[in-house]
Image (cartoon, rainbow, N blue to C red):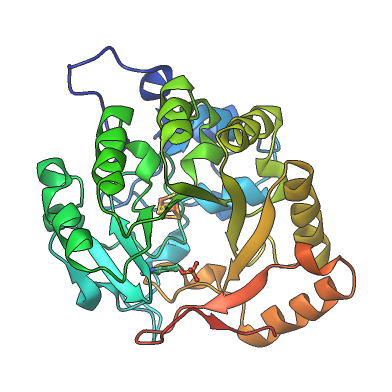
Amino acid sequence: MGIDMHDGSAPPAAWQRAAAVTSPAELLSLLGLDPRLPALDFERRRDFPLRVPRGFVERMRRGDPHDPLFLQVWPATAEAAQAAGYAADAVGDLARLKQGGVIHKYRGRALLIATGACAVHCRYCFRRHFPYGDTLASRGGWRDALAQLEADASIEEVILSGGDPLSLADDKLSALVAGLERIPHVRRLRLHTRTAVVLPERVDEALTTWLTRTRLQKVVVLHVNHANEIDPAVTDAIARLRGCGATLLNQSVLLRRVNDSCETLALLSERLFDCGVLPYYLHLLDRVQGAEHFEVDETTGVRLMAELAARLPGYLVPRLARELPGAPAKTLLSW
Ligand SMILES: *Cc1c(COP(=O)(O)O)cnc(C)c1O
Ligand code: SF4
């Protein structure tokens, strides 16, 4: 995995040169954590190694093995647990994935697996076992993906996902957008990205230029799980995205010990709104192998939502949702 390195056709952008921490020992040392602490035992997972941008490490509290940002990236030994009901493809996406990386599950919206790469490796991620190799939309200059989108006039919105679409270089992304603009029935472009949060320098001039120019309506759905992820650099990156004319939303995953309290969720919603971002979904964890230690059960999730609704204006309360294979939309668990 890792982010898309430049292919020699242009000098690498600053975000492509930014180094990530990939060594567990280095991460512990940066955070002043004692590797002998039992809580810090880890698994060396070659299939999904530690990966975290340095700027994100700087937002973690020093000396705290329970820091909510650290827990999201630390390859704990608990990942090796084989829990019943936890599968490699938790949401049934493989069955729906067409050649060209297109997943068309919901009416009017098609999702493109643009790339398998991510700037950060989130340990709870449901795509960690995805066999991306054969199916990426970016292969062959997007030809297969564009042909499929063109052939189905019901598709009005194209969602770029992954992995993280902002792992791709801007020449690839702007080529895709140019292709989408030539399809008359496509009206909206949505980006699902965590890179803009963990690596805010990714939102550079090359990106904002093509995003501003497109005729498509733009929605950017960020992925922030905890208010501590939002530092001044992230606030600025969000302002740049809004300056492109994009509507900004956020989706989070409800994660044990990371954000499973009303206080933490309320603070997150308020910080997001300070930056001009509305909370959209709070997802219950997809039951993916190796992520069981992050699970918050549905009853607790519903109770947290009731507490949150009693505390915040309605527009700051995200929708608690779970993805069930075969359903016509995300399944909402709170009103
Ligand atoms: C989540 C998802 C969407 C978008 O659903 P919204 O409810 O519109 O946010 C579209 N396609 C797929 C395959 C999805 O998983
Ligand atoms: S949650 Fe998003 S950013 Fe994190 S590893 Fe999964 S796809 Fe990548």
Query: Is residue 258 visible to us here?
Result: no
Q: Position of residue 14 (x, y in %)?
A: 42, 17
Lateral position of residue 90 relative to residue 278, left or right: left
Q: Residue at x 77, y 64 (%)?
A: 315
Lateral position of residue 63 relative to residue 297, left or right: right
- Height in image: 103 above or below 17? below
- Height in image: 287 above or below 66? below
* Residue in the foreground of this view, choosing between 76 and 149: 149
Q: Residue at x 11, y 57 (%)?
A: 134
Q: Position of residue 97 (x, y in %)?
A: 21, 69
- Height in image: 179 above or below 80? above
Q: Position of residue 71 (x, y in %)?
A: 58, 52
Query: Is residue 204 visible to us here?
Result: yes
Q: Residue at x 68, y 79 (%)?
A: 301
Farthest residue to the right: give it: 311
Lateral position of residue 45 relative to residue 250, left or right: left
